[in-house]
Image: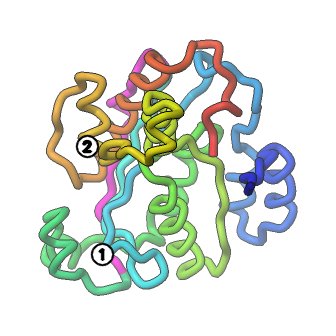
Amino acid sequence: MFFKEVINWKIRYAQLADDAQNNLIKEFYLSAFSNANAAVKEISFVALDFETTGLNSQTDDIVSVGLVPFTLTRIYCKQSKHWLVQPRRNLSESSIVIHGITHNDVDNAPDFDNIIAPLLDALRAKVIVVHYAAIERGFLNSALVLRLREHIEFMVVDTMELERRALKAKQGLIGQLFNSKLGSLRLNDCRKRYSLPVYEGHHALTDALATAELLQAQLRHHYTEETPLCEIWS
């Protein structure tokens, strides 16, 4: 039997801050929220979403960023942010079909380098929420390595992982023994289970909003407002 390593993010962030060479990244670590026992009702979240040139964070790049701050009970749309940036990788035809961002759209857009400071500032002291952690973690790390020559590591709440847990609990032991299908973990399909409205996908800001609303619904249905952060973080 294999056990997933549980990271103590308070200790990990302190280690990362000591090792960081770039001041922006060091400040991000020093201000990172890491109280494992904080109740979800007390936490300031921020939903984060990227649109990219493809799905491989090692060979593709970010073309747009959306983020939406929220709490268990409120979404702060006026504080949301959306950036279109010029990737250092070519846009693929398949990615253009998915998110609709063309070469003309990004020709005059700034490089991601120009938004690193405001992006990290917007994420600072908040719990980052994503739908499928590998994308946002992998692409932000690769973007910073490419531009700052420095890695970044951060804790997230992953709504896809929370939905997978909820579906496995509903599946039950018999379902798990017979390996019955869990159901789709796509963002809009997850939202349908909570009767949330259908949004047009693959726009970074809209998907960030959709992720924020999904977490609120998941917390209401499967957890309590007193649930500690460590039960839902990754």
Q: Quadrant of residue 62?
A: bottom left
Left or right: 186 with respect to 37? left
Measured as percent of width and height from the top left, residue 123 is found at 55, 46
- Please report whichever mark, 1 or 2, sits nearer to the chain's N-terminal start: 1
Give the residue displayed 30% in from the left and 52% down from the top.
204
Q: In the image, is residue 103 above or below residue 230?
A: below
Disc number placed over residue 53 in the picture, else none: 1
Question: Mark 2 Cα within 10 Å, few/some/many (few <14, many 20+)?
Answer: some
Q: In the image, is residue 178 above or below residue 144?
A: above
> How was this image coloured?
rainbow
Disc number placed over residue 206 in the picture, else none: 2
Give the residue displayed 53% in from the left and 33% down from the top.
173
In which quadrant will I find the N terminus? bottom right
* Type of amino acid at the residue the image marks with label 2: Thr
Left or right: 181 with respect to 141? left
* Type of amino acid at the residue the image marks with label 1: Thr
Measured as percent of width and height from the top left, residue 141 is found at 57, 69
Q: Nearer the viewer, residue 6 or 202?
A: 6
Q: Which residues are magenta?
A: 72-87
Measured as percent of width and height from the top left, residue 33 is found at 70, 38
Give the residue displayed 48% in from the left and 59% down from the top.
136
Measured as percent of width and height from the top left, residue 14 is found at 85, 52
Give the residue displayed 39% in from the left and 27% down from the top.
76
